[in-house]
Amino acid sequence: MAPRIALITPPDAHEMAREMTPSGFELVITTPGSAGYAAALAETEYLVGFVDMLVKETLYQAAPRLKLIQLLSAGYDRADIGAARRAGVPIANNGGANAVAVAEHALLLMLAVSRRLIWQHASVSAGRWRGNNTPRVHELRGKTLGIVGLGTIGKKTARLAAAFGMPVQYYDIARLSEDAEDALGVRFRLFREILRTSDVVSLHVPLNDTTRHMVGAAELALMKPTSILINTSRGLVVDEQALCKALSAGAIAGAGLDVFDEEPPPSDNPLFRLDNVVLTAHLAGPTWESNTARLRNAFDNVQRVARGETPLWVIPELG
């Protein structure tokens, strides 16, 4: 019997997955809660997909032959790490497959907020060629970017920002060597220094106990009134209520958000009433190109484990 890969992903990836499945493996596409789900898991050795929410004791009981859980997402904040440790099955994330997409989206939000893009579009489409009062807009060139979390996405964001002429500083618990900083063109600063001295603060951290609400009222109060906050990581990294208050009061100039406390956000979310925010629907990562790269990385990792090798991109808690 060929080793089985169970794939759990939206339908738009199914055809691509079938085309990319390595020879010698059986691909079974299934849906949690469906009639064939339990039977699919019973013989599954490799679970691939957006499945961090499924990582709990019941998964390992249902899939006793499991050798690898391969996430197509970068984040894994919904996984039961304790259950994963007890099961001894490695969990790997997507290996930075969406890093280019998220980095580009972060720059997109920086530009959209700085140039008041939503206001400009609304004015033109409503027949107000330049609106009633033309707002002040800004260039990115010369503005200091503070990156919080210099992983794969953070590094790619730094390179893109450099192309716009932005000086880049960063904070990360894993500090680069000075040579590596020189090569990337970044400089280390403490977290509070980043907040106080950056014109743009961009968040690129995983959600865990140390990063939950790492940007709250006290941190927002440190930022310049002319600065903007970009969040393409996870909504709960920022205290959303505190951010709304800071934006409403003009304590910071604006924000670009791809993620929220609750997704989708409720219709009465106060962010919707603000004109100094740009909001997207947790869509920074899923481009056509990144979806291809996710599957490529996933199937490469499956083959590594099948050969008896250690998988790449195992999450730090299990490494």
Image (cartoon, rainbow, N blue to C red):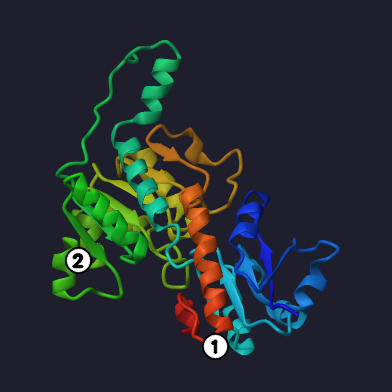
Q: Which mark is residue 212?
A: none
Residue 254 placement (x, y as % from top left): 34, 40
Quadrant of the rendered image containing residue 148: bottom left
Query: Is disc 1 surrounded by few (<14), some (14 to 19) or many (20+) residues within 10 Å?
Result: few
Q: In this rendering, would 235 be left or right of 128?
A: right
* Residue depicted at x 67% and y 62%: 8
User: The N terminus is located in which quarter?
Assistant: bottom right
Residue named by callout 1: 308
Name above or below for residue 102 compared with residue 247: below
Helix, strand or loop under label 1? loop
Q: Nearer the viewer, residue 248 or 289?
A: 289
Task: Single out the mark in the foreground, 2 or 1.
Answer: 1
The amino acid type found where label 1 is placed reads: Gly
Residue 130 placement (x, y as % from top left): 32, 15
Residue named by callout 2: 189
The amino acid type found where label 2 is placed reads: Arg
Helix, strand or loop under label 2? loop
Quadrant of the rendered image containing residue 19: bottom right
Q: Nearer the viewer, residue 233 or 192?
A: 233
